[in-house]
Image (cartoon, grey):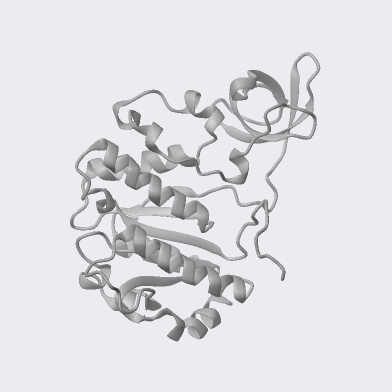
Amino acid sequence: MTSPFEWPPRRRRKKLAVAFPASVLATEDTLELKTIKAGIIGRILAVYRVDQAVIFMDPESREGDLKLLKLLLEYMVSPPHLRRKLYPITRELSAAALLPPLRIYSHDIPEDLSPGVKLDVLIESCRGFECRAYMGRWGYSVIRGSFKPGDVVTAVVESVGGNVVLSPSTWGDAYTGFKVKVRREVEPLIESFRVKGYLIVLASKYGNWIYESRDGVKSRLSTSKGLLVLFGGPYRCLYEYTDGKLYDFIVNTIPLQGALTVRTEEAMIATLSALDNVLEYFKM
């Protein structure tokens, strides 16, 4: 039997974007509990190789939760060895120790630097095309390229004698996490992805069983640029306050659910797992 596990994990052939409301944090009363919830969502996004996470405002969303969720997800996906420089200590990050590590490929840096090792570095200053780059616990290095202070760039170690010398590089086809975006209103969010050629799918208890829609999803996705999957919040489903015609498919991935309500993060696991199997089976 051939195992489907592979490391490093490759990027998806079709881009996968996931949208969910800031109200996912509204049920939690403390910063610590909100941080834990954001950590769960970040892990789900990474496990299922989501390329873009989009946060929107539903009727129950609060501005503070929107800003906090965006900050915590961006913090999680940032290179751990650079966070001290990238994020000053603030009240919003005071419980960041509760966030689980993503363990994505670009975060798994070897203990020792040696030629050929890749890592993300922070550009601190430049003089012409020669820049000083911060590497975390390994200190500073020199890298040549057209960068500006504040850039986070992927580099490969060329030499470690005296000054560490780096060259610009990439993570190739490996999956290295998600981008976080904010689009406050649902309809403009959907339209922005539709014009880019994405297939729009809503996960809802009011939808058809996912495997009844499998062939249709496969057929439409084969000519699409990617897939946008939307989820509702803890108080109401998107189907209850938006026009169903906004979506190409409305799918239910937890038929005959045993609990009266399904939390957003639980729906994300069920839906992304089902779609992952469909996408991989059809090599998408």
Total labels: the figure holds 0
Q: Is residue 167 left or right of residue 228?
A: right
Rendered position, 23 above or below 96 = below
Instruction: Pinpoint residue 209: horizontal percent, then vertical percent.
Output: 38, 82
Instruction: Pinpoint residue 96: horizontal percent, then vertical percent.
Output: 38, 33
Instruction: Give whichever of 214, 127 is nearer the camera.
Output: 214
Instruction: Give whichever of 189, 154 is nearer the camera.
Output: 154
Kindly identify the residue that appears in the image at 38 percent across and 59 percent down: 19
Kindly identify the residue that appears in the image at 23 percent across and 58 percent down: 58
The single residue placed furthest to the top in the displayed view is: 162
Kindly identify the residue that appears in the image at 44 percent across and 64 percent down: 193
- Is residue 210 visible in the rendered image? The answer is yes
The quarter of the image holding the C terminus is: bottom right
Instruction: Give whichever of 29, 165 is nearer the camera.
Output: 29
The quarter of the image holding the N terminus is: bottom right
Instruction: Pinpoint residue 126: horizontal percent, then vertical percent.
Output: 63, 20
Rendered position, 265 above or below 37 = below
The single residue placed furthest to the front in the displayed view is: 1
Q: Quadrant of residue 281?
A: bottom right
Kindly identify the residue that appears in the image at 56 percent across and 31 percent down: 151
Q: Is residue 67 left or right of residue 124?
A: left
Rendered position, 282 above or below 36 = below
